[in-house]
Amino acid sequence: MKAIIALEDGRTFNCRSFTGPGEAWGEVVFNTSMTGYQEVLTDPSYRGQMVAMTYPLIGNYGINPEDIESDRIQISAFLVKEYQNFPSNFRSTSTLADYLKAQGILGIEQFDTRALTRHIRKAGAMRAFITTREIKPSFCIKRAREIPGMAGQDLVKEVTTKVPYFWTKGKPFYISNNVPLDKNIWRYRGSKHFVVALDFGIKYNILRCLEYAGFEILVVPATTSAEIIKLIEPDGIFLSNGPGDPEPVSYAIKTIKDLLSYRPIFGICLGHQLLALALGAKTFKLKFGHRGSNQPVKSLLTGRVEITSQNHGFAVDTDSLNENNIKITHKNLNDNTLEGFRHRELSIFAVQYHPEASPGPHDSRYLFDEFKKMIRLKCQNALT
């Protein structure tokens, strides 16, 4: 079925829908990963975005229920060069097209994804409108320009959990509304360390990695206050990934400020940005973001280069960090942007990239162990 992609700057692309009739809108971005399209589809960090894959053949290994990163597709449209409707993989349970159609997500193919990517790299990520209706391109461009921009929007409230839940044995276990959030929530605690994870759009594989590292995890809504978290009395606090501009998420920044000296804190992606804002730093919007599984990051602590998976359109301004309190630990080797920091006195550290995504494949898994060591040391000092 014929379709058209219209960008806000007037550029258009003729294409085809492989999911039937429909319309979609949002910020159009590109991802350079060769695999992992199912994880991209379900990553809450992509909320409100239309994702174009630079790898030309997509759909060849189908879809399986084990590799999802959230309970639904998060993107607003999926753009590929060539869709493969006959998957070949022993884990596949459905085609990509059927998966998208079941959730009302538009799939687009048969256009020059290289040209779109080069255009975005030159002009920057921008708003776009896609339709299968036969209407004038000028109308489509007008619709693209009417879409709200990502900057200034709080998208976290669209993806955060509504109720707290434990993550146990690879699945969420939701807590009844009648159960108070206090230290008695851990009444079944054993020898494990307990972590409260603030959900700004958390990926399932982060929870899997935390569980594998030996934590018991309680996931709470992004609006949970510091007072409630202190009543729970966790051993550590995790700040998750999530979508969009960190500055409008003011309630989370306030919560993090109130928790800075309370327990060890580990932040990933949006959690990294929110933690930096709570420490007085500033953030800015990248021209076209970092999205893919091949981003080189250098650890300034060890000199090692990690191949990382990333998905973010905003970054922390390195010059705004207080060097008296903050030590820069990681840098992006492509554009020298900040990829990690830790506090010089408090038990706090964060990274911009996704250590759970494993493109290396295990280059960055050590960060979960670092969090565990930090919590163990804090607990030992509390006993002495």
Image (tube, rainbow, N blue to C red):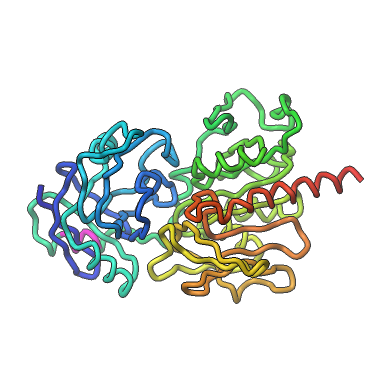
**Residue 337 in the image: x percent, y percent?**
52, 71
| Residue occupying image coordinates x 69% and y 69% | 327
Relative to residue 358, is residue 50 drawn left or right?
A: left
Magenta span of residues = 140-144
Position above or below: 191 against 227: above
Furthest-right residue in view?
384
Residue 34 picture location, percent across and down: 35, 55
| 212 left or right of 58 in image | right
Which quadrant would residue 56 be assigned to in this image? bottom left
> Does the stretch in magenta take in 14?
no
Q: Relative to the observer, which residue lies in front, 286 or 212? A: 212
Quick check: 317 above or below 162? below
Residue drawn 49% across and 46% down? 201
Tally the numbered discs: 0
Residue 85, image quadrant? top left
Q: In the figure, 367 relative to 193: above or below?
A: below
170, above or below 132, in the image = above
Give how far across and how far down residue 264 sits, in percent: 72, 50
- Residue at the (16%, 62%) spot, across then down: 13
Q: Quadrant of residue 173?
A: top right
Image spot of residue 316 (x, y percent): 55, 67
What predominant SS class does the magenta segment belong to?
Answer: helix
Q: Nearer the viewer, residue 99 or 66?
A: 66
